[in-house]
């Protein structure tokens, strides 16, 4: 009966084109653009990495994004159910199930980093001298101590409080407010950073490619990161597209997602590297770049405390809108596939995220010495989701387009509502989806399997 009632219920939709774009951009723009992009670019030589990354986004990320958006909108269902609807009686739904597993795994470690950024907003207001006396020691202490649990839980609770309101009144409404705020803060920070004396070296580091030390490893990092950054292979774009109207312009949405995700990563680089170089610090610090090196740079500039607070607020906003999308994937799956209400679904997901997520916060404290296959719990979840589940799910999604849904049908769906736009992308899409995109994903999988 419950299922029957559910089937009769009208599906929620995004209210406006702007709202759906902000929600999808909100998912794409996250820790990946600021924290992950900047440290990977930093260790891979800056400009050279950027060029390769842009190519990966255009040649591989773009076709996969189109594929996922068309699966979602055509079926009008979240991942898993979408595949069951479009190919009844087959096993293609496994592609969706792996995506749900990936997003659930990510939901178990993303709140930890979101919590650090929320915590650092407060630390830079209330404990500026403690936080900056020795930034490495302060970060070590913060991430190992009780505050890291409180802020991770707060980040998770905030995302859930928005999600409980639903797609239009929750996700869409908040994305429409938070994303422009994020853009505004970003512009302020970039202006501050590039006008510091000595900033030129940082700008050059990011924008002047030097391939002399670029490695195959750097290329593979760029490939993997383009997927992560665009929220692909996890069911997010399938799920969000299922709330899009038939009249929504997918071509405009695709262009906006790609342009804004890449643009924000670029701006984050322009906010971070010039400041790091101007203060005589190193860009290749690794994952600690944003939490250790950058606060050090802020201490040395006038009004650094204000800029530091703004910076972590920016990171937190980016993380929050992505976390919302990560949680929406299993939530919508439970709703569509099993008719479980939003409230109950959120309770289930909260229980999973707390049980399996708490150890990822503890991995920086009491569980420091605990390892799975030689990795700490946090890194294990990150690698398992991003290096294994995500490319497999994306590859199955593409194979589904080629062998079941049909490239032509997917292209037709893409153009519906586009009002004559998107012709160029849709002309290249069939070629890319049959050649470079699957080939590149196979390369990512082989690398994860340790073949090279
Ligand atoms: N795209 C997000 C980022 O760049 O931080 C990360 C992300 C979002 C990963 C949504 C996974 C996901 F399902």
Image (cartoon, rainbow, N blue to C red):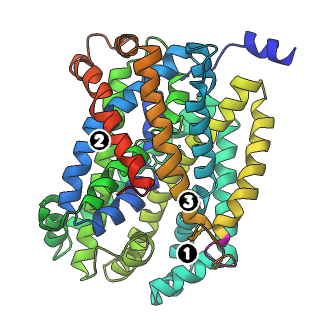
At label 2, counting other C-alpha atoms closer than 10 Å, the crowd grade (few under 14, some 14-19, many 20 or more) is many
Q: Which residues are magenta?
A: 362-366
Per the picture, the main secondary structure of the magenta-coloured stretch is loop
Give residue 6's position: percent from left, percent from top. Answer: 77, 16
Residue 336 located left or right of residue 37: right
Residue drawn at x 56%, y 38% is: 99
Which residue in the protein does label 3 denote?
114
Using the rendered view, name the quadrant where residue 335 is placed: top right
Using the rendered view, name the quadrant where residue 48 is placed: bottom left
At label 3, counting other C-alpha atoms closer than 10 Å, the crowd grade (few under 14, some 14-19, many 20 or more) is many
In the rendered structure, find residue 123 and report the number of the disc placed on it. Answer: 1
Query: Which of 393/328 is in front?
Result: 393
Residue drawn at x 42%, y 38% is: 25
In front: label 3 or label 2: 2
Labels 3 & 1 near each other (Cβ < 8 A): no
Residue drawn at x 33%, y 14% is: 418
Dot 1 falls on a residue whose secondary structure is: helix
Give residue 422's position: percent from left, percent from top. Answer: 27, 19
Dot 2 falls on a residue whose secondary structure is: helix
Q: Is residue 90 visible?
A: yes
Which residue in the protein does label 2 denote?
57
Give residue 332's position: percent from left, percent from top. Answer: 66, 30
Counting residues from the start of the chain, the first of labels 3 and 2 encountered is 2
């Amino acid at each position: 009966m419950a299922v029957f009632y559910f089937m009769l219920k009208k599906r929620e939709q995004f209210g406006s084109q702007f709202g759906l774009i902000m929600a999808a951009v909100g998912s794409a723009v996250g820790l990946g653009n600021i924290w992950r992009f900047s440290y990977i670019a930093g260790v891979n030589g800056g400009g050279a990495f950027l060029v390769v990354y842009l190519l990966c986004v255009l040649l591989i990320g773009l076709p996969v994004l189109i594929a996922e958006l068309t699966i979602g909108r055509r079926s009008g269902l979240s991942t898993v159910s979408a595949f069951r609807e479009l190919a009844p009686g087959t096993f293609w739904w496994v592609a969706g199930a792996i995506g749900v597993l990936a997003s659930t795994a990510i939901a178990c470690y993303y709140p930890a980093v979101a919590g650090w950024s929320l915590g650092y907003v407060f630390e830079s207001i209330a404990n500026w001298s403690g936080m900056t006396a020795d930034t490495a020691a302060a970060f070590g202490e913060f991430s190992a101590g009780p505050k890291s649990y409180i802020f991770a839980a707060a980040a998770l609770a905030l995302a859930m409080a928005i999600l409980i309101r639903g797609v239009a009144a929750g996700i869409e409404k908040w994305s429409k407010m938070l994303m422009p705020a994020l853009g505004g803060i970003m512009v302020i920070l970039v202006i501050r950073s590039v006008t510091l004396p000595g900033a030129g070296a940082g700008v050059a580091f990011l924008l002047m490619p030097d391939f002399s030390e670029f490695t195959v490893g750097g290329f593979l990092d760029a490939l993997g990161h383009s997927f992560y950054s665009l929220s692909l292979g996890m069911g997010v774009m399938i799920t969000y597209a299922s709330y899009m109207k038939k009249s929504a312009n997918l071509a405009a949405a695709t262009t906006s997602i790609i342009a804004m995700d890449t643009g924000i990563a670029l701006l984050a680089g322009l906010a971070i590297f010039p400041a790091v170089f101007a203060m005589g610090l190193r860009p290749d610090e690794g994952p600690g770049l944003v939490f250790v090196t950058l606060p050090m740079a802020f201490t040395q500039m006038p009004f650094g405390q204000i800029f530091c607070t703004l910076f972590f607020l920016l990171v937190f906003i980016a993380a929050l809108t992505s976390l919302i999308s990560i949680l929406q994937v299993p939530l919508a799956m439970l709703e569509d596939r099993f008719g479980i209400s939003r409230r109950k679904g959120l309770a289930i997901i909260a229980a999973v995220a707390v049980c399996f997520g708490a150890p990822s916060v503890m991995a920086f404290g009491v569980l420091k010495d605990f390892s799975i296959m030689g990795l700490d719990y946090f890194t294990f979840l990150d690698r398992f989701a991003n290096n294994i589940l995500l490319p497999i799910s994306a590859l199955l999604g593409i194979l589904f387009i080629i062998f079941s849904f049909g490239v032509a049908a997917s292209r037709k769906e893409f153009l519906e509502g586009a009002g004559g736009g998107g012709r160029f992308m849709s002309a290249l899409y069939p070629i890319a989806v049959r050649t470079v995109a699957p080939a590149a994903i196979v390369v990512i999988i082989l690398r994860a399997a340790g073949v090279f």
